[in-house]
């Protein structure tokens, strides 16, 4: 299973990266990935035609799209459309951020995490 991470690069712009969640064990109900630490969960309904201009993620969070379509434009210029079944891990906590546009009515689940953002990990490593 794969998901998309949105992170802040060294250029202070947001970028997309595909990540393979891998799997840790096989089970009669399917293959399971490792456990990801989480803090909380929210449910979100959205209407068609909403737009949230340049912003950063408020905290590292997985957005699991249940219904509808949302376009996310990274400050690097790349755009991606997320649909039912897609997962976005938003970790661009600094820099210019991204724009979010709702293309259709829909629903998503937002799972906040304690996992450090990609840019925080790089920052910590460079200080060592």
Image: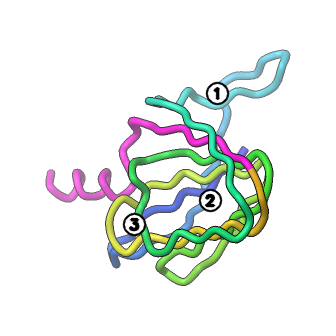
Q: Residue at x 49, y 71 (%)?
A: 98
Residue beneath disc 3: 8
CA neighbours of label 3 inside 10 A, class few (<14), some (14 to 19), many (20+): many
Q: Residue at x 52, y 74 (%)?
A: 74
Of marks 3 and 1, which one's residue comes earlier in the chain?
A: 3
Of marks 2 and 1, which one's residue comes earlier in the chain?
A: 2
In terms of image quadrants, where is residue 123? bottom left
Q: Residue at x 83, y 19 (%)?
A: 29
Residue beneath disc 2: 18
Q: On the rendered structure, is 67 left or right of 108?
A: right
In terms of image quadrants, where is residue 35? top right
CA–CA distance between discs 2 and 1? 19 Å
Task: Please tell me the numbered disc located at residue 103.
Answer: none
In terms of depth relative to the viewer, which is nearer, 23 or 47? 47
Above or below, 125 against 115 in this view is below
Element assignment for label 2: strand
Element assignment for label 1: loop
Q: Position of residue 23 (x, y in %)?
A: 67, 33
Residue lying at the far bottom of the rendered structure: 77
Of marks 2 and 3, which one's residue comes earlier in the chain?
A: 3
> Marks 2 and 3: which is nearer the front?
3
Above or below, 111 against 17 in this view is above
The stretch of residues the image draws in magenta is 107-128
In terms of depth relative to the viewer, which is nearer, 9 or 86? 86
CA–CA distance between discs 3 and 1? 28 Å
Residue 112: within the magenta? yes
Q: Position of residue 12 (x, y in %)?
A: 34, 74
Residue beneath disc 1: 24
> Marks 3 and 1: which is nearer the front?
3
Q: Is residue 2 visible?
A: no
Q: Residue at x 63, y 76 (%)?
A: 79
In terms of depth relative to the viewer, which is nearer, 13 or 71? 71
């Amino acid at each position: 299973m794969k998901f998309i991470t949105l992170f802040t690069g060294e250029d202070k712009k947001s970028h997309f990266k595909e990540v393979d969640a891998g799997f840790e064990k096989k089970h009669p109900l399917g293959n399971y990935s490792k456990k990801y630490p989480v803090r909380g969960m929210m449910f979100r309904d959205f209407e068609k035609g909403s737009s949230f201009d340049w912003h950063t993620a408020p905290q590292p969070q997985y957005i699991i799209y249940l219904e509808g379509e949302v376009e996310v434009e990274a400050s690097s210029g790349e755009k991606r459309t997320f649909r039912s079944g897609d997962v976005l891990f938003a970790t661009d906590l600094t820099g210019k951020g991204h724009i979010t546009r709702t293309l259709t009515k829909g629903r998503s689940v937002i799972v906040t995490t304690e996992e450090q953002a990609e840019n925080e990990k790089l920052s910590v490593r460079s200080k060592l």
